[in-house]
Amino acid sequence: MDKLGLYTKFTAYEGSRDRLAELLLEAAGGMEAVQGCDLYVVNLQDNDASSVWVTEIWSDPSAHQASLSLEESKRLIQEARPLIAGIEQIKLLPLGGKGM
Amino acid sequence: MDKLGLYTKFTAYEGSRDRLAELLLEAAGGMEAVQGCDLYVVNLQDNDASSVWVTEIWSDPSAHQASLSLEESKRLIQEARPLIAGIEQIKLLPLGGKGM
């Protein structure tokens, strides 16, 4: 089964970026126990006061899909939604490398 | 010291993507021994026959800078250059998460 990689860019409403990053770090904490989630890293973007990027690698696409229906994920999505002005996502096929 | 994150998109000339990905995987292999390189993952982009993305996390920006002058890196850059039509890079500040 192919792995799945995702870069997801969250654009926050003005003044909401740091709170959004906190919620995404909370989501990352929840991922520690999630099978199939190999990487879930929260990043700010250099020279951009409104963007937060999440880098994910999943052992397979179905593991990612399943994670979205976890109670914890649904609660965090609910809480983050009012902070988010837009979402863009780049879907990747991780081939290999260091740290995966 | 803050960590450094990078998403680098390499656009290959037509027919050159797979060879470019091979060279980047070779570069990733070389990173195994490089101190300060926490993550170096090579990805294809879904539904895009010309792009290769590299996801990097470095313990600090100077470790990344130093890696560019390694003989192995210089040789691979030299070999990859004729395959590359364009490079775009997103610079990130990794805050934390699973797998780093």
Image (cartoon, coloured by chain):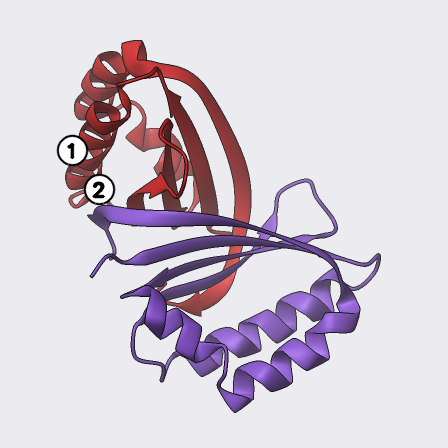
Chain colours: A red, B purple
Local crowd size for mark 1, using a 10 Å CA cut-off: few (<14), some (14–19), many (≥20): some
Q: According to the image, label 2 marks what residue?
A: A34
User: As rendered, which of B17 and B58 lies closer to the eye?
Assistant: B58
Q: Secondary structure at mark 2?
A: loop
A85 lies left or right of B44: left
Q: Residue at x 77, y 67 (%)?
A: B83
Same chain, labels 2 and 1: yes
Chain letter for the residue marked with disc 2 in the picture: A
For residue B13, above or below residue A32: below
Amino acid at the residue labelled 2? Val
Q: Quadrant of residue B46?
A: top right
* Residue A59 horizontal/vertical position (percent): 38, 50
Secondary structure state at the residue bearing disc 1: helix
Residue at point 29% right, 31% down? A67
Residue A41 in picture, x, y percent from top left: 29, 46
In the picture shown, does residue A42 fall above or below A26?
A: below
Question: Could you classify mark 2 by the number of other residues whose Cα lies within 10 Å: few (under 14), some (14-19), or many (20 or more)?
Answer: some
In the image, which disc is placed on residue A26?
1
Query: Is residue A47 something one can see in this rendering?
Result: yes
